[in-house]
Amino acid sequence: PTSGAAVTNNKQPVAFTIVDEAGGSGINLSSLVVKQDSTVVASSAIVSTAITNGYSVTYTPASALSDGSHTITINVSDNDGNAATAKSTTYKVDTVPPTLNITAPANALVTNNASLVVRGTTNDTASSPVTVKITLAGTDQGSVTVGTDGSFSKTLTLANGSNTIVITATDAAGKTSSVTRTVTLDTSKPVVKSATITPNPVDAGASMVISVVVE
């Protein structure tokens, strides 16, 4: 990986090339030393293929790396004993998706207000920052600003009827977490169709039943 990259594979292969100048003594492959977090890795984890004036090399960790930052350092010499300037790359392993907590709206909410605010928090300890995407009925609702504390909010405009909202958080390694909320907008007003009194007329002090039909 390039330096600063975030990866989801905890056995991420590291690929590099080692070459000598044209007409030089050539690469002394036995001098190659690869270190994972300052520890020399076993030669069995290294595979090399000859290329012009050198080798294409891949190192694959034998066991899973922990989530977090890791550094690979590479040293090699030519057949005349001239040592190359060491190269290193530092990358992050992230196998856990970001946390995503939606505080509003509640699922299955029914409202008569077309304006709806989606609120929540998100975080990823291994590979922040986290980006947030919100879709309404499958349509992207545009950029969402995530604060330094992981909080975010976005105002949406609902359509009458059922509205499906999907909130997705994505960390720097590409891991995602999603929450779906269904909100119903009901702006129709009830209509009183009829009202009856039984019995009618009714004696003073007697009981009566008032029946109302509403649609």
Image: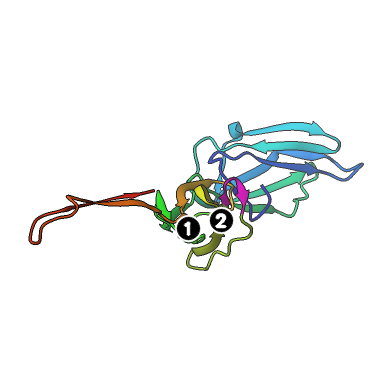
Tag shown at residue 132:
2
Q: Secondary structure at mark 1?
A: strand
Q: Amino acid at mark 2?
A: Val
Residue 135 location, x and y as percent? 58, 50
Q: Name the residue: 66% across, 53% down.
A: 88
Q: Residue furthest right?
A: 23
Magenta stretch, overall SS? strand
Q: Nearer the viewer, residue 7 or 170?
A: 170
Residue 42 image-quadrant placement: top right
Residue 1 location, x and y as percent? 66, 47
Q: Residues within 10 Å of mark 2 (few under 14, many from 20)?
A: many
Q: Name the residue: 47% across, 54% down.
A: 188
Residue 138 location, x and y as percent? 60, 45
Q: Name the residue: 74% across, 46% down.
A: 77
Alpha carbon separation for disc pair 2 and 1: 8 Å
- What's the magenta region? 135-140
Tag shown at residue 122:
1
Of the numbered discs 2 and 1, the one sitting upstream in the chain is: 1
Tag shown at residue 68:
none
Q: Nearer the viewer, residue 147 or 8?
A: 147
Q: Residues within 10 Å of mark 1 (few under 14, many from 20)?
A: many
